[in-house]
Amino acid sequence: MPAAPQKRRAERAGRWAEWAAALFLMLKGYRIVARRHRTAAGELDLVAVRGGSLVFVEVKYRAQRDAAPFALGPRQRDRLRRAAALYLAGQPRWSGRDPRFDVVLVQPRGLPQHIKNAW
């Protein structure tokens, strides 16, 4: 039974981190075009547009900033690539944009850290 409250807390923290990341990106001039977009390959946390780029953003929330980059391994990157391809297949209006994968690291205190072209 204790796992359910812990899972709910993690879900709330994840939603808060996605909201904080979206706000941070909007303040930097990005336009958020999708949030928590589900595909058969998995979920895309955020999809944003800025200039000629269509940016697929993975949001990572960790208590320690040093731990966040290690949470995105090769399998997850491959899953995100497949999810992005499915998103693009269903959204022809974005076909002329250059796709890019970014990561936004969020921790309880401090500003989010935006890593462009993470892979």
Image (cartoon, helix red, strand yellow):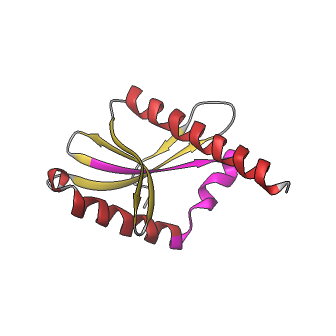
Q: Which quadrant: the N terminus?
A: bottom right
Residues rendered magenta in the picture: 54-75
Nearer to the camera, 117 or 15: 15
- Relative side of 99 to 106, left or right: left
Q: Quadrant of residue 81?
A: bottom left
Is 32 left or right of 57, judged from the image as shown? left
Instruction: Give how far across and how far down residue 35 sits, in percent.
Output: 41, 44
For the point 16% across and 56% down, which residue is it? 92
Examine the rendered structure and indicate whether residue 26 appears above or below residue 88: above
Where, quadrant-wise, is the C terminus in this rendering?
bottom left
Q: How far across and down, in percent of the image, does residue 37 sit?
A: 40, 52
Look at 22% across and 64% down and name the residue there: 89
Residue found at x 56% / y 62%: 72
Relative to 93, 36 lies left or right: right
Q: Is residue 112 magenta?
A: no
Q: Residue at x 56, y 36 (%)?
A: 112
Q: In the rendered structure, does residue 61 fall within the stretch colored magenta?
A: yes
